[in-house]
Image (tube, coloured by chain):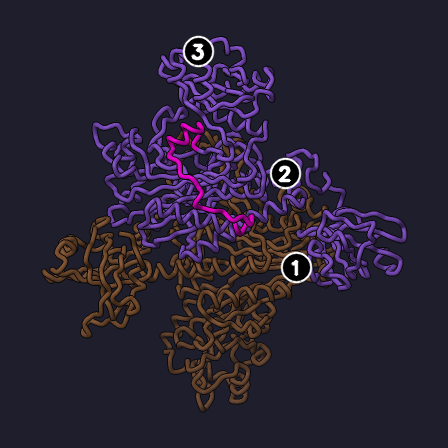
Chain colours: A brown, B purple
Amino acid sequence: MKRTTYAGLIDESYLDQTVTLSGWVQKRRDFGDLIFVDLRDREGIVQLTFNATNQSALTVAEDMRSEYVVAVTGKVIKRDASQINDKIKSGAVEVDVTSAKILATSKTPPFYIEDNVNANEELKLQYRYLDLRRPEMQKNLRVRSKIMSSAMHFMDTHDFINIETPILAKSTPEGARDYLVPSRVFPGSFYALPQSPQLFKQLLMGAGFDRYFQIARAFRDEDLRGDRQPEFTQMDVETSFMTADEIRELVNEWVKAMMNDVVNFDLDTTTIPTLTWQESMDRFGTDKPDLRIAYEIHDLSDTVSNSEFGVFANAVKAGGVVKAIAVPGGADHYSRKDIDKLAQYIERFGAKGLAWLKVTDDGLTGPIAKFFKPEDSQALIAGVGGQTGDLLLFGAGRNDVVSATLDYLRRQTAADLDLVDKTNPWAFAWIVDWPLFEYSEDFDRWIAAHHPFTMPNEEDLHYLDDGEDPHKAHAQSYDLVLNGYELGSGSIRIHRMDIQEKMLKALGFTPEKAHEAFGFLLEGMEFGFPPMGGIALGLDRLAMLLAGQENIREVIAFPKNSRATEPMTEAPTRVETKQLNELGLFVPEAE
Amino acid sequence: MKRTTYAGLIDESYLDQTVTLSGWVQKRRDFGDLIFVDLRDREGIVQLTFNATNQSALTVAEDMRSEYVVAVTGKVIKRDASQINDKIKSGAVEVDVTSAKILATSKTPPFYIEDNVNANEELKLQYRYLDLRRPEMQKNLRVRSKIMSSAMHFMDTHDFINIETPILAKSTPEGARDYLVPSRVFPGSFYALPQSPQLFKQLLMGAGFDRYFQIARAFRDEDLRGDRQPEFTQMDVETSFMTADEIRELVNEWVKAMMNDVVNFDLDTTTIPTLTWQESMDRFGTDKPDLRIAYEIHDLSDTVSNSEFGVFANAVKAGGVVKAIAVPGGADHYSRKDIDKLAQYIERFGAKGLAWLKVTDDGLTGPIAKFFKPEDSQALIAGVGGQTGDLLLFGAGRNDVVSATLDYLRRQTAADLDLVDKTNPWAFAWIVDWPLFEYSEDFDRWIAAHHPFTMPNEEDLHYLDDGEDPHKAHAQSYDLVLNGYELGSGSIRIHRMDIQEKMLKALGFTPEKAHEAFGFLLEGMEFGFPPMGGIALGLDRLAMLLAGQENIREVIAFPKNSRATEPMTEAPTRVETKQLNELGLFVPEAE
């Protein structure tokens, strides 16, 4: 019984045809001499009917149960008008089965195979192969597959060469924690799984390949969050002899093709705004703004520097800022209790309270309204662009705390009030002109804002010289943002050894350490490396967004859980002592 | 100076056009007021001329040296007739440069950048980015890239879904040695890098994806040979509800498309022979025969069982075999000394000598000719299909030793005498009906000939039952062979738990061990797994063959050397004690 088509493709165009189908029993309804079976395959569902006209098939159907694998042959006929189901492609027809065979049986699954099923997340990961049978998961992984096809096709037609770089690579400093792989040939030495193919792709440009592309796996041994996994996939691009503008234009073309191929959306890339990092931070408090939300952050520091409200005046006097957003229609929506909850949440950003006001026809109301004279109120409302009915939310204090706070409040209030613009479903943005360095609280020192191979702006190169402040330098780097998520990060790279050495020095490397870690790259730059730049787009996050999901686990076939384990295979596991001995490893806990 | 085209693309169609090029200085000849520079980029070479008409450009050219990176603008003009170079695309033209810029300088490279350069292999790996600049390496990696593009396109248009499977996976028995990755969250536990996505792709079929494809990285911690690397790439396919015949037909279509796309060869897949494993072993002594060599192995055991030549008669009496090949024209080609060398080489296969005879118009000559009466000689010559001028080479003894010996002698003599058929450059073959098990000398026990998930032939299933000999079973497996190399290996998989349990039992697994290692798969099979099968083609070996290379290192951007190290980055390396502490690892040698 050789399958002739997919169950989910059958519709009225198949009427009167004899088809052979293979798939899973989704549901079975037994009326004795008449049995209905919903047959599911990757394309969807079709209804099978078994009746006494074909007794042998009917007998087989009597044994069918949920998730049995079956093959059937039958004729596509019209359903009774009363039975038509508009919700599925095959809803107007059914297959009158003449012969049937059970190919595999199934125990009762631990959860029902349907979308939005209420099952424990860990149980679903343990039986991932069952959870993946759900239509939504099938769709998610096909969206991911389509993105890859589209990218491969685009890169191929744009003369990019697909080159694989090593997974067994070298551990290098300046990044997240590496996953290590012990060497058997050299006990005590380790490979590291790459955090990105960055160095290899720069070497490929040094090798003259000119245009490189790879769908590359990368690894980070960090604590996990919703949008992080120990291994992730980058669509990785590098080019020689192109400017940052030219690379962004190329990426625009790529993204346009992808949106067309994957979600059938005609993206007008000329409307993608380019914001400097500073502008993005000022207007949205973040370097990955969600531009579907219309209201922005306004700096009121000057307006309130002499305010009678001491919190504001003192914040400005102490060298801080006072900024605010005006949430349209927020005045009616948020009770004092709601606002208290927001105030509590933002403590994690370092905020010490949440000042708020409501805009009415008669001016401002709220507990702190009394501190504002009518003319001050008017200045405040004008400064934040407030309208009657708006809720004004303030941040006062250190600029980074205020930014993080108002970024959160902007996104949260927009979600609460459904203020995310649905007419602009795919809000892309380029964020450019980043600082070259950023201060890391984790490491308590300056680190590279992107990575140590990012080229400073031409006019900022002198900041890397002795006696100057390197942290003033900005970089030829650019991030692509979609709907408030960072999709990818790119830059022009350093291709000259003298600049690279200065950069590593600014990051605190001694010359010896620099050569120990990156000697092969520094040496390479002495042999004619071309100007180069590129970008890497995160496939997991992009697939998540294009599939309309909120967690990258939904677009990964076999993800790890929050403890970096894989509940189905139970990896990682203990291994045999013989294996450890071969690697010269001693694991105290394994004894 | 924005590049308008590649140097290597310029030919007479560009005449009189102004072009801007970027690339590397291959060669520079300085005649004072006239300087010639060969400019190289990934597409090839074009000659630049600098002269006093454009003094500023000439001045820049004076500073140019080998491997400098430069950008130039100039007009494409005809070369002097005396200077025309037929060997390169741009050989009839040159670029009369009007402006020039040095983008990066270069020290003198440790070896000259040209094909067939005589440089130490380790040095070339250390400066891999320089070695990769050679035209041949550029071509090799582009062949590899083309194979991937072609495969992605084929799979995409044949409804395959590209799904990524984990690199951080579970260590499982029954395979080569795993590379391990220590877990930080669970010190003492380890992930393993996958030796193939085999189990995951079976689970994806269980999940109903129906057609899966992946260009997948796989890993084996084994000692290295010319065609082995610690990490390698598989083009991995799995399908549901298809028979072995249907899968082979699909692969034929795929290979046909690939040969067209990559080497512009119109492969007639109807001419691809299908041999049983037994037939291949009998005729060629190997399971990966090179069908471009016409002469085959002949079994003469019956013919010589009563021979006066004791070596032959005794071999047969002891239960062994006597087999031979007739090497066309070998009689004149090989001296006694040459034959002694072959005899010495085959000792590694366990052969204890090399009997040989030469066919003349008057019968056989050679040291053992005296043992054969005229009628025995005629029977021998007829049995091996010998002609006047042939060299007959014999193997006598254990069948496996004889097979290995004559396989080697067949390939070696064909190479020596140039007897590989050049009119059939791509000799594909399918080898089917493999034994399910093979005896491993390494492990001193029976192991799975392919892997433990291979479905036995329907009629052989009973061999797995208690009281029967499982090693008699043959499998629904198939290998694709090209020019004497195994390109890929596939099979129908076991999709029923009862068969899988019997298979693991035959491999020596207790039920407990079986469930510890493969419990998730065995459990999955209880929930309705479809009949399934697939194949994996090795990308490295395929790229090597299609690029006309003899070592897979030539088609890998950054390969490891024979000690599994990467001379450029020096991976694997020592890591910081802090990193080991976080993993709960103690490395005695690292102290």
State which region is magenta: B260-287
Q: Is residue A3 left or right of residue A207?
A: left
- State the residue in front, B557 or A316: B557
Task: Give neighbour class at mark 1: few <14, some 14-19, many 20+ (Cα, 10 Å).
Answer: some
Residue under numbered circle 3: B311
Task: Point out residue A180 in the picture as x, y percentages from the top left corner.
Answer: 50, 41
Say what secondary structure mark 3 lies in. Answer: helix
Which chain letter matches label 1? A
Magenta region includes residue B277: yes
Residue under numbered circle 2: B125
Rendered view: A513 above or below A100: above
Residue B78, label in figure: none
Point 38% across, 51% down: residue: A558
Q: CA distance from mark 2 to mark 3?
A: 49 Å
Task: Point out residue A459 in the picture as x, y percentages from the top left corner.
Answer: 72, 63
The amino acid type of the residue labelled 2 equals Leu
